[in-house]
């Protein structure tokens, strides 16, 4: 086993820990680890991330379901538009993007760089949501649930998740809180199930005969991540979630800035 892969597998535990603690953020760690530590090509890394995050979130979702912290009606409500969008994005949109997206006499934009830069922008957006305190997260409004807004948000989440290989938990949780009027603890468990289903369906859209998959790598990475989600679930009982969310938000912000700097200015 290569040393870089060993380091990657050790770091993958933190992917699961993050999902177990705050119900999101797994792909924010898995894509950079796969790309920068383990040397996986960025487009392929986003596919691998979908499998890793989807499988890990499934274990966490089952655990939350046993604690009666999953609203399956909202899993379906968000899940249908999200599944459609993420599958079509991985099956049609991502493969259709040319390897050289833009080329001028002074600048060439490659597909892999575009995906990493968009991923970094998503990370920075996520970090702002994580750093900003959530208000009244355990209070449900008297307003009616906006089903049209939920459907539109589901399509958007699926598009973003499919393009950058993210689970989309950082978008799903605010939507569950403010559009679907869901208490925070229930939102985390529900988000894990939505992330799981949409990520695994998105990964299925990546399975093509012309793109070999290193099953040994992703299964080992996933196994380590699953260990992490049980650790994260245990730690969630010991650590105040809001403080952890804020600290992780600052970490994500720095990672996003690093990726943009590395992809645009250091290559």
Image: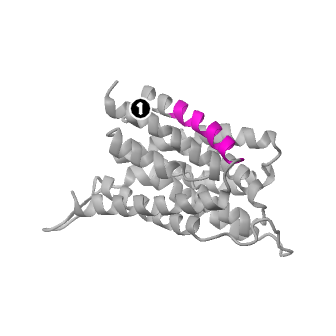
Give the quarter of the figure containing the N terminus. top left
Disc 1, SS? loop
Q: Is residue 68 left or right of residue 208?
A: right
Q: Is residue 31 left or right of residue 236?
A: left
Q: Residue at x 32, y 27 (%)?
A: 2
Q: Nearer the viewer, residue 12 or 95?
A: 12
Q: How far across and down, in percent of the image, does residue 159 sit?
A: 53, 59
Q: Residue furthest right?
A: 142
Q: Residue at x 33, y 62 (%)?
A: 260
Q: Residue at x 42, y 30 (%)?
A: 217
Q: Quadrant of residue 255?
A: bottom left
Q: How far across and down, in percent of the image, does residue 9 sit?
A: 44, 33
Query: Label 1: how many residues lie within 10 Å, few (<14), some (14-19) or many (20+)?
Result: some
The secondary structure making up most of the magenta span is helix
Q: Nearer the viewer, residue 215 or 134?
A: 134
Q: Residue furthest front?
A: 238
Q: Provide the residue span drawn in magenta.
A: 222-237
Q: Is residue 60 left or right of residue 168?
A: right
Residue linked to disc 1? 213
């Amino acid at each position: 086993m290569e040393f870089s892969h060993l380091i990657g597998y050790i770091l993958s535990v933190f992917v699961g820990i993050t999902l177990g603690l705050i119900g999101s953020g797994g792909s924010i760690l898995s894509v950079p680890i796969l790309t920068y530590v383990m040397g996986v090509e960025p487009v392929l890394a986003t596919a691998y991330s979908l499998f890793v995050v989807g499988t890990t979130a499934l274990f966490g979702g089952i655990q939350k379901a046993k604690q009666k912290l999953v609203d399956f009606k909202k899993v379906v409500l968000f899940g249908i538009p999200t599944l459609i969008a993420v599958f079509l994005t991985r099956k049609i949109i991502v493969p259709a993007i040319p390897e050289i997206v833009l080329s001028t006499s002074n600048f060439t934009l490659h597909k892999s760089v575009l995906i990493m830069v968009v991923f970094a922008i998503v990370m920075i957006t996520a970090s702002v949501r994580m750093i900003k305190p959530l208000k009244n997260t355990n209070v449900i409004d008297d307003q009616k649930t906006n089903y049209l807004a939920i459907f539109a948000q589901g399509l958007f989440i699926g598009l973003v998740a499919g393009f950058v290989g993210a689970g989309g938990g950082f978008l799903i949780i605010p939507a569950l809180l403010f559009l679907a009027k869901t208490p925070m603890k229930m939102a985390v468990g529900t988000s894990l199930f939505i992330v799981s289903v949409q990520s695994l369906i998105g990964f299925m859209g990546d399975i093509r005969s012309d793109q070999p998959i290193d099953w040994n790598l992703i299964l080992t990475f996933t196994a380590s991540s699953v260990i992490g989600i049980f650790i994260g679930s245990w730690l969630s009982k010991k650590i105040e979630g809001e403080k952890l969310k804020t600290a992780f938000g600052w970490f994500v912000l720095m990672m996003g800035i690093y990726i943009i700097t590395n992809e645009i200015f250091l290559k």
